[in-house]
Image (spheres, rainbow, N blue to C red):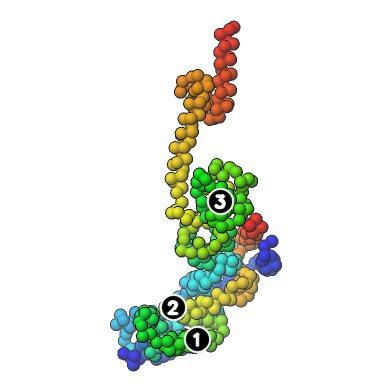
Amino acid sequence: MSSTKIFLKSSDDKTFEIDETAARASETLKNIIDGGCLDGVIPLPNVSSNILPKVIEYCKKHGGDNGSSKKIANGGVDKDKEILPDYDEEEDKREKVRVDELKKWEEEYMDFDQQVLYDLMLAANYLHIKGLLDLTVEKAASMIRGRTPDQIRENFNINSDFTPEEEEEMILIEDEWDDEWAFD
Amino acid sequence: MGCCGEDDDDFFKQLISNPNHHDCSSGSTQNLISTPQNLQNPSMDVDVISPMNSNFSALSCRDTLRAIFECLPVTDLARAACVCRFWNSVASDREIQTKAFMSPWKLKDVIGNPSSGSFWRDNSLGRFAISHHILRRDTVASLAVKYSVQLMDIKRLNNMMSDHGIYSRERLLIPLSIPDILCNRTCYVEFDSYAKREVAVLYLEGGPDGKLSSLMNRTSTKRSNRRVIDSLKRSMRVDDVTAEYYLSISNGDPRAALAEFSEDLSWEQRTILS
């Protein structure tokens, strides 16, 4: 089964190859495969050719195309192992190393500019790849945390579209908020 | 100003310096359509995933923006709401706000609507309190020991001037000493008339018995009313209906009722004499 290849077509008509097991990391692709709607190439009109290889790279890492990552995908099996008396400590150590390795890989994988981040986020959302969505969303959230609205706007290149009245109102709310703090 | 005073100043300065910027790229559909990249792909929907208008696409998609906001603590969520209209609409969503409010304490649920959305912006431990229904032998000191909190903190939270008179209240709010108590619990947003503010109240024994207590109140007031009428009847030496009449014209004040009654009595005597 793992040898089955699936072809994905990007929005700009470029075709990419992916193993079926890797493709199953995506809920959307999994449904297409299981639904039997597969006839050669799956068109992905919402994902461009510069993002799709990145998505495929993630799927390959997490789609369970090698034995060890299957285990992480199937948490139940792992837990059973812990209950068994002949539980292998070596196995546990190897698992830890693998998780660390995966973290390192993710760190390297996530090293790209903002543009790619947002496109990847949308692609992950569209293809329902939860792990990838969590990764990208977390990175975007880290760009908001601890920053003022002004800094956030600068970060994300957004202009305020509030009317002067609304700004006035916001200042009032802000004051109320400060008052509350003063009482606490 | 609060602890983020300087930040706010910057924020407002910026607001004041360019108040005519109404061209927020995220959220406004017209803008998305008019971007050049988008014109190259006219077949695409506006909120569809595509390599379009710079980095705004993901930030103007409600789903992904929600996912981002769900990773934020309350203060950052409140700031994100000040960025632009679209962000404001997503960040002001009740579900996101309550989620952020509950997440650091692992609360199960928050029930009730605060009077202002600003309630959700502060989820410090001071927002929470345990509702303690006052029992016969309770004293402020005993409650302080029972819940292992400072006596002064109980008094401060409930605006108590003295240790006495806790029996005139139905309940006291107990400040939280251990945040773990909140884990997997449900809180009720209530305005406490003694604390004079909205508090996320935790009931350790069951839920809030609002209906029950008001019912008990009614029966108890009925009973106390009966007692007042009885004593009035005795001191005036009149029947039920007369006592009730005088009590009603003096708005339930037995002293005023008695004064009214004696005035009438003396008037009667005067008219008989003359």
Mark toward the viewer: 3 or 1: 3
- Toward the viewer: A116 or A133? A133
- Toward the viewer: B68 or B98? B98
Instruction: Give the quarter of the image for residue B153.
Output: bottom right
Expressed as whole percent of the image width and height from the top left, the position of residue A116 reads 53, 83
- Residue depicted at 55% across the width and 52% down the height: B143
| Secondary element at tag 2 | helix
Up-down relation of residue A61 to residue A176 (above or below): below
Up-down relation of residue B244 to residue B214 (above or below): above
Q: For the view shown, which residue lies furthest in the bottom direction?
A: A3
| Secondary element at tag 1 | helix
- Alpha carbons under labels 3 and 1: distance apart: 51 Å
Sooner in the amino-acid sequence: mark 2 or mark 1: 1
- Toward the viewer: A45 or A59? A59
Binning the other alpha carbons within 10 Å of mark 3 as few (below 14), some (14 to 19) or many (20 upward) gives: few
Q: Which chain letter matches label 3?
A: B
Q: Amino acid at mark 2?
A: Lys
- Residue depicted at 58% across the width and 57% down the height: B149
Mark toward the viewer: 3 or 2: 3
Tell me, for residue A28, which label it has, or none: none
Expressed as whole percent of the image width and height from the top left, the position of residue A85 reads 36, 83
Up-down relation of residue B61 to residue B152 (above or below): below
Report whether residue B81 is seen: no
Expressed as whole percent of the image width and height from the top left, the position of residue B113 reads 50, 55
Looking at the figure, which quarter contains the N terminus of chain A? bottom left
| Secondary element at tag 3 | helix
- Residue depicted at 61% across the width and 49% down the height: B159
Q: What residue did someone put label 3 on? A: B142
Q: What residue did someone put label 2 on? A: A130
Q: Amino acid at mark 3?
A: Ser
Instruction: Give the quarter of the image for residue A151.
Output: bottom right
Q: What residue did someone put label 1 on? A: A100
